[in-house]
Image: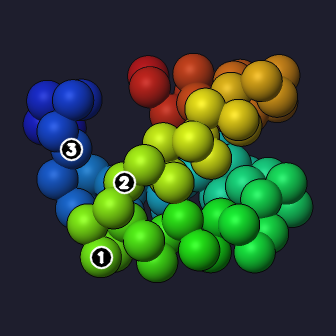
Amino acid sequence: MQNNANPSMQDLLRMAQSPAGKQLLQLLQQKGGEGLQQALSNAAAGNYADVKQALTDLMTDPEAKKLLEQLGR
């Protein structure tokens, strides 16, 4: 993988398709629902603040932290 601070689109897709990535996406959808969809739409338009906030909120969830640690390996 490339530099973790700036992963490529391929890196992101690979992570999203991993078992931990799939679980994390499912958890994001359960907890974020419509707000997550809006944040992703904003990110596609170049506004990453909403995604950053959604991820910050998610980091308070122990299961999400565990999944993110798995993705970081």
Secondary structure beneath disc 1? loop
Q: Quadrant of the N terminus?
A: top left
1 and 2 marks in contact (CB < 8 Å): no
Q: Is residue 71 left or right of residue 44?
A: right
> Residue 60, image x and y in percent?
77, 24
Secondary structure beneath disc 3? loop
> Residue 61, image x and y in percent?
82, 28
Up/down of 65 relative to 58, above or below: above
> Residue 2, image x and y in percent?
13, 37
> Residue 44, image x and y in percent?
33, 74
**Dot 1 crowding, Cα within 10 Å, few <14, some 14–19, many 20+:** few
- Residue assigned mark 3: 7
Q: CA distance from mark 3 to mark 1?
A: 18 Å
Q: Is residue 53 left or right of residue 65?
A: left
Q: Which mark is residue 45?
A: 1
**Dot 2 crowding, Cα within 10 Å, few <14, some 14–19, many 20+:** some
Q: Nearer the viewer, mark 3 or mark 2?
A: 2
Q: Please tell me which residue lies in front, 70 or 50.
A: 50
- Residue assigned mark 2: 48
